Image: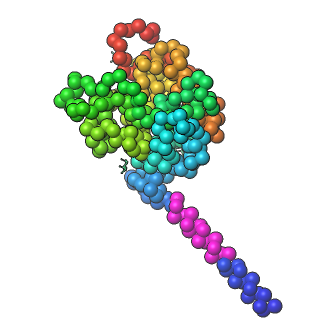
Amino acid sequence: MEEMRKAIWVILAMAVLASSVMVGVRGDDTKTLVKKVKGEKVCLKGWECNTWSKYCCNETITDFFQTYQFENLFSKRNSPVAHAVGFWDYQSFITAAALYEPLGFGTTGGKLMQMKEVSAFLGHVGAKTSCGYGVATGGPLAWGLCYNKEMSPSQSYCDDYYKLTFPCSPGVEYYGRGALPIYWNYNYGPIGEALKVDLLNHPEYIEQNATLAFQAAIQKWMSPVKKSQPSAHDAFVGNWKPTKNDTLAKRVPGFGTTMNILYGDQVCGQGDNDEMNTIISHYQNYLDLMGVGREEAGPHETLSCAEQVAFNPTKSSSSSSS
Ligand SMILES: *[C@@H]1O[C@H](CO)[C@@H](O)[C@H](O)[C@H]1NC(C)=O
Ligand SMILES: *[C@@H]1O[C@H](CO)[C@@H](O)[C@H](O)[C@H]1NC(C)=O
Ligand SMILES: *[C@@H]1O[C@H](CO)[C@@H](O)[C@H](O)[C@H]1NC(C)=O
């Protein structure tokens, strides 16, 4: 009897010990540090959200977006006919995202908004790097991250107008590279400055380093084209309040306006068009694959930019009706 009591006690003690160790290990992984700054709660959360920020108090991207989801979204990227086999992976996206999570990327609003933002950002990426046209196996939406650079550039994308601010490096070409492809010296220059990498002299870094390629893309997503305008991030998560002019130009918070910011009148204000619909389809498909569901994308008016006037028109002809 005594023996048995002892044995049970030992087993219980071992179980308690084991479970406390497990909690300890798990706790270390996701430990959140909290403090108050001027009455506002700010947090730190391990390597993924490592600058004091209110956004770090929320779930982080790895809490709701894992390797298998990345594989589902970009299922054909390593197929033999793809053009950047072995280049893109989950870890490089997460490593790049971690730089921006303290700023609100994928950490703003509740979990639903967070999942939607990651789907929206990756929807743009998928559409811009897809090689899935028409009859491709798996359907045209399964081929995101097929490219990491423009395959047959027709020019070197050097604009001499910027020779004082962003001079082209001799022999260097500024063709499209990356997850939201960057073109031209005047785009490589500022993004390089923001990331503290000399992209003006070494644009090829973007096609050699997937983490850097994702960082450049998220940097673009998080930055307004002009100070008075919203970033794609702000327009998407609802940080941005449209002005009267925006309302007249049919610019409303949501996915449609992110296309306006990223592509302007190349895609928006052109009525219904294939390029726009391809980007929207990627976003909707990714919402499904993430388990959010495309019905969460909201009404067509906010998804589309068919009737929006571009924030920064390229043509000065005022042919659009508004
Ligand atoms: C954090 O998530 C909650 C909902 O879970 C949300 O209400 C809040 O706005 C989020 N915090 C920030 C800074 O976005
Ligand atoms: C790739 O880029 C990241 C982010 O800029 C950097 O930390 C890393 O060292 C780079 N990797 C290589 C192999 O250069
Ligand atoms: C609103 O649009 C008008 C006409 O295009 C323009 O003159 C004005 O500067 C705009 N206002 C703002 C705040 O952008």
The residue depicted at 18 percent of the width and 30 percent of the height is 164
**What is the magenta range?**
15-30
**Prevailing SS of the magenta stretch:** helix
Q: Judge whether residue 30 can be spotted in this image.
A: yes
Residue 34 visible in the snapshot: no
Q: Is residue 233 above or below residue 102?
A: above
Which is more toward the observer, 147 or 246? 147
Res 184 → quadrant:
top left
287, 40: nearer the viewer = 287
Q: Is 20 part of what is drawn in magenta?
A: yes
Where residue 188 appears, as percent x and y from the top left, is: 31, 34
Q: Residue at x 53, y 40 (%)?
A: 78
Q: Nearer the viewer, residue 320 or 78?
A: 78
- In the displayed structure, 31 sits above or below 155; it is below
Residue at left offset 46%, top offset 19%: 268
Residue 229 drawn in magenta: no
Q: Residue 66 at x, y = what percent?
A: 57, 48
Left or right placement of residue 7 versus residue 26 in this view? right
Which quadrant is home to the N terminus? bottom right
Q: In the rendered view of the protein, which quadrant contains the C terminus? A: top left
Question: For residue 234, what is the image quadrant?
Answer: top left
Toward the right, the furthest residue is: 1
